[in-house]
Image (cartoon, helix red, strand yellow):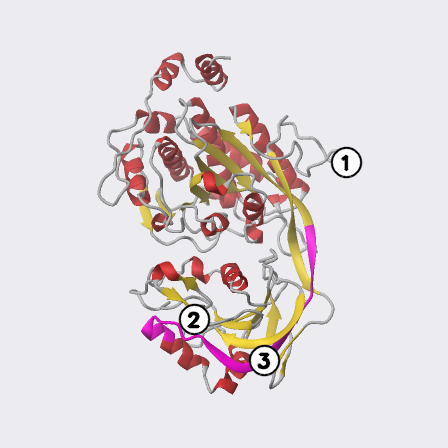
Amino acid sequence: MAPRERMGRIMEDVGVSRANRFRYASLGALVLGLTGLGVGTARAESPSLAVGGSQITRRAIEEHVHQLSTPDMEGRGNGTEGARRAADYVAQRFRASGLEPAGTSETPDGTLASGGKKSKSGGAYFHPYVGYTGVRVEGVIGLRDNNRGYAFNDDYTPLGFSEDGQHTGDLVFVGYGVSAPELGYDDYAGIDVRDKIVLAFLGEPGMRDAGSPFDGTSPTIHSDLYRKAQVALEHGAKGLILTPGPLYAKDIDRVWKISTEVAFRNSGIMVCQMTNNAAKSLVEPAGLTLDELQKKIDESHEPASKDLANRCEMRVRLRRVETQMANVVGKIPGKSDRAVVFVANLDGYGMGPDNSNPVVYPSANDNATGVAALLEIARVVEQMPEAERTVYFVVTSGRRLTSAGSEALLRDRVIDPESVDLFINAFALGSKNFSSLEVMGTASGSGLEALLGDVNKQVRAPVSLRTDRTVSSAGDHIPWYRAGVPVLTLFGGAARVIGTPLDTESEVDWGSFERRARYAYGLVRAASEWTGAFTSAER
């Protein structure tokens, strides 16, 4: 079928008038010029942003949210039949909208031979993977140094993303465990931690300093626990002990409970969290105190890494509960293989935390709204003339398990990260927040701030846009940001009902949601049409 005929057929299917079809077919691509800081602003208004955005209606997004929030969906808890039904719904909508399958399987579990149910979508839209939905200590574990042994659940606990193992080695203090040479700071510079165990503060330098190079008082990716583990592993350490810094942290002597610590990925290195009081004993042989060390780092903005004249033994053994989960992936090919990825997580809060008294948590705003917006944006983008970039639409599972689905997507290279120019993540777009939209991560790539403003000028009903340079510290964008991809997070704002059984359709601000969804469409469309690159500082 010829492209023009195919476009007409699709528009007929979704009820677009002949007049509007002619308008769509004659739209030109948005061209962004280079100005000022390097990427620039829109040189001319693009009718496709306003006209296309107007095709996203309250009626359509309301229907998607309704379908995803029914009791049948069981709160879309990871690994449940409800989550599978929701994923099937998404795949069917992808097919109906004309998206090409871009997953790895026709079924959410990757097989039919073992009784897997074939999706009604009729294409390989699914990306099945095994995730960890629980973790507990199994067998003998331990932590001790030259002076004493430390008690599990009183002094320390292994974290859910810890590797199993046993190792005895020299103990080294590595500040905040941060390696950020691009910011002129590296706790690992000039110190050898190979085959050693490292002690690091939670957080990052200058958390109370608005002038800190780590984006002031806002936490950055360098505060991420998994990031700290990966940095320690990359420098050859065998174990990582994390403790709160005594100057700012609250509950510095609280031991985290592994049953509620949800980072269930395996980081490849043993990791424990220790109370501040217990960690004092680790630095005493070197004549140091944690207060002095933190104060020195934060006042000077310089590392204070030191060998602690102490040896430590770590022993960790965990049992992980494995669960079959799946992402749903579709794409709209562009003129090139360069790509924009738009993501919303499907998993909700399931049937709540109390297994003895299960209650459906509909999870309408968080995040049926994000998925509903994605489905409508995908439908409308598919109707438009071919853009410069390929656009991937991904509905992930496992965000509540520390972005396990997004991590698997990257690990299995379902989408090549080297081809991705921009990753956009959307959630809670229905919050009652007067049509405001917070967009985080503008410093992750050049020209993003200008792009956001240009889009808001061109959509028919602008949002109250609030931009933040800082990359959100949690979400499905994190693995891609680590891989050097510029990322943006679209957030409708906090809502008191999120994470409760009250997060229902009636709590969604439909007018604000429609406006935010139309803006998100404009952002995806403009990013896919632009011929430049959103260069990341990581690349």
**Crowdedness near tag 3: few (<14), some (14–19) or many (≥20) residues, C-alpha within 10 Å:** some
C-alpha span from label 1 to label 3: 52 Å
Q: Position of residue 387 (x, y in %)?
A: 40, 27
Disc 1, SS? loop
Q: Position of residue 425 (x, y in %)?
A: 45, 43
Q: Position of residue 201 (x, y in %)?
A: 47, 71
**Looking at the image, can residue 491 be seen?**
no
| Residue 313 is covered by the magenta coloring | yes
Q: Amino acid at mark 2?
A: Gly
Report which residue position mark 3 lands on: 311
Relative vertical location of residue 139 with respect to residue 125 in this rendering, above or below = below
Q: Is residue 325 left or right of residue 526?
A: right
The segment highlighted magenta reads 297-322
Which numbered disc, 2 or 1, marks the residue that appears first in the sequence? 1
Relative vertical location of residue 238 with respect to residue 405 in this rendering, above or below = below
Report which residue position mark 2 lands on: 190
Based on the displayed image, in which of its 4 quarters is residue 318 positioned? bottom right
What residue lies at 62% left-to-right and 52% top-to-bottom?
Answer: 352
Relative vertical location of residue 307 with respect to residue 40 in this rendering, above or below = below
Q: Amino acid at mark 3?
A: Arg
What residue lies at 74% left-to-right and 68% top-to-bottom?
Answer: 139
Report which residue position mark 1 lands on: 115
Q: Amino acid at mark 1?
A: Gly
Q: Are dots 1 and 3 in contact, CB under 8 Å?
A: no
Which numbered disc, 2 or 3, marks the residue that appears first in the sequence? 2
